[in-house]
Amino acid sequence: MRPQKVLDIEILTGLAKVFRSKGYEGASLKDLSEAAGLKKASLYHRFPNGKQEMADAVLNHISDWVDENIFSNLLDNDLTPENRLKKGLAGVRMLYDGGKEICIFRALSMQAGIELFEEQVKNGMNVWITNFKKLGLAFNLSHDEAENRAIQVLIELQGSLIVAKGLGELTVFENTLQKIENKYLRD
């Protein structure tokens, strides 16, 4: 068997960039194949069900990365809650490249993408809330306060990404991460 010239991680990273920047509807096969470093035929060979399968693979790839680099830190009982928070937010910073990248949930929940990925987006957001809620409980917040704080974290992260992108000011995202950290640490 001939070795693959382009590694799966490189393909998924390229596809993610296109979906993040153009959304599901705006992502053309030409854009996707160029970003993946493959000819259209090779891209279809890897993803026979087309663009939807590519987006599903990107969602799964990002979900795995988030589990490994953010949620595993938030839930690491070997760390203090403070260190769990700091490591988790460091992962958030990496995921969004300091505020330069938009959220894949946002990108795939616009136009026709919402119909195709609604359940995945909803489930993904619920996982974010659940994991930040568990962190809040580790900080001895009440059940309700931990859940409210977790929902607010998701709102603040998503909002800061939009505002940072719209204003071209990455400090908006960074300041939001600092505010999230401060809210947990002062309670």
Image (cartoon, grey):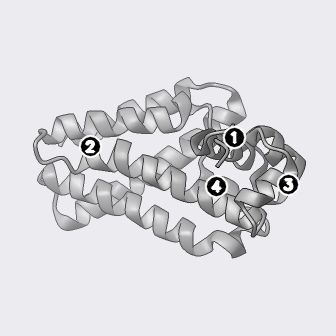
Which mark is nearer the camera, 4 or 3?
Answer: 3
Where residue 118 appears, as percent x and y from the top left, is: 61, 72
Q: Tell me which amino acid carries mark 1.
A: Gly
Q: Earlier in the sequence, mark 1 or mark 3?
A: 1
Name the residue tied to disc 1.
Answer: 14
Disc 2 or disc 4, which is closer to the eye?
Answer: 2
Q: Amino acid at mark 4?
A: Arg
Q: Nearer the viewer, mark 3 or mark 2?
A: 3
Where residue 97 appears, as percent x and y from the top left, is: 54, 30
Q: Quadrant of residue 149?
A: bottom left
Closer to the camera: disc 1 or disc 3? Answer: 3
Amino acid marked by disc 2: Asn
Q: Please tell me how crowded label 2 is: few (under 14), some (14-19), or many (20+) other residues with Cα within 10 Å.
A: many
Query: In which quarter of the view is residue 114 placed?
Result: bottom right
Instruction: Identify the disc placed on residue 162.
Output: none
Residue at image mark 2: 73
In the rendered image, residue 49, in percent from the top left (x then y), is placed at 75, 70
Q: In the rendering, which numbered label is found on residue 106?
A: 4
Q: Secondary structure at mark 3?
A: helix
Above or below, comparing residue 51 to residue 136 in the picture: below
13 left or right of 50? left
The residue located at (69%, 59%) in the rendering is: 54
Q: According to the image, label 3 marks what residue?
A: 41
- For numbered disc 2, what is the local secondary structure? helix
Q: Residue 85: which quarter of the image? A: top left
